[in-house]
Image (cartoon, rainbow, N blue to C red):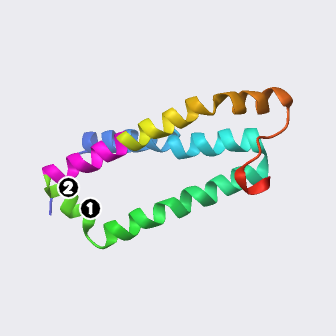
């Protein structure tokens, strides 16, 4: 049995702590929504984030992650599709910035399509 050196163990522990302490995009999104919309908005953001991960978890459990990791072409397609989706979201944010700015200056939380 191989023994891990103390230096390697220390490097692993330090790297793990740094990665655990730094908030990811999901945490920053949830905090931002909670600050903008209150407790219910924050909780709904957590719920939506968790539900959005379910298809990814299911596909990885079925082995799609291994197939994508082994195929350079498929991995490139996934990367390009993700980049295009982020560009789409950016364009939508720019297109609707006036409505968001008006909601921010009015002091009222922004209304969604579900609460009209």
Q: Is residue 95 above or below residue 24?
A: above
Residue at the image position 21 percent from the left and 63 percent from the top: 66
- Circle 1 residues within 10 Å: few <14, some 14–19, many ≥20: some
Q: CA distance from mark 2 to mark 1?
A: 6 Å
Element type where label 1 sits in the image: helix
Q: Is residue 60 visible?
A: yes
Q: Do tag 2 and tag 1 residues touch (Cβ < 8 Å)?
A: yes
Between 4 and 74, which is closer to the camera in this rendering? Answer: 74
Residue ID at (32%, 44%): 12
In the image, residue 106 sits, relative to residue 17, either above or below, namely above
The quarter of the displayed image where residue 86 is located: top left
Left or right: 22 in relation to 37: left
Q: Is residue 28 magenta?
A: no
Location of mark 1 (residue): 65
Counting from the top left corner in percent of width and height, residue 80 is at 28, 43
Q: Residue at x 15, y 50 (%)?
A: 73
Residue at the image position 36 percent from the left and 40 percent from the top: 84
The residue at which mark 2 appears reads as 69
Going by the image, does 73 lie left or right of 17?
left
Kind of element beneath mark 2: helix
Neighbours of disc 2 within 10 Å: few (<14), some (14-19), many (20+): few
Locate residue 49 relative to residue 65 in the image: left or right.
right
- Residue 18 visible in rendering: no
Query: Where is residue 68 drawn, in percent x and y?
Result: 21, 58
Return the residue nearer the eye: 23 or 6: 23
Tell me, yes or no, whether the highlighted magenta stretch contains residue 79.
yes
Residue 31 rendering spot, x and y as whole percentages = 66, 41
Which residues are the magenta region? 72-83
Pinpoint residue 8: horizontal percent, then vertical percent: 25, 42
Main SS, magenta region, reads: helix
């Amino acid at each position: 049995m191989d023994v891990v050196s103390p230096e390697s163990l220390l490097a692993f522990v330090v790297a793990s702590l740094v990665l655990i302490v730094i908030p990811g995009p999901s945490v920053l999104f949830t905090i931002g929504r909670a600050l903008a919309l209150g407790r219910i908005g924050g909780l709904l953001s957590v719920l939506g984030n968790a539900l959005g991960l379910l298809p990814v978890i299911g596909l990885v459990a079925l082995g799609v992650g291994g197939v994508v990791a082994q195929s350079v072409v498929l991995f490139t397609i996934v990367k390009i599709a993700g980049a295009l989706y982020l560009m789409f979201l950016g364009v939508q944010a720019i297109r609707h910035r006036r409505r968001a700015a008006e909601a921010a200056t009015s002091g009222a939380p922004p209304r969604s399509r579900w609460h009209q």
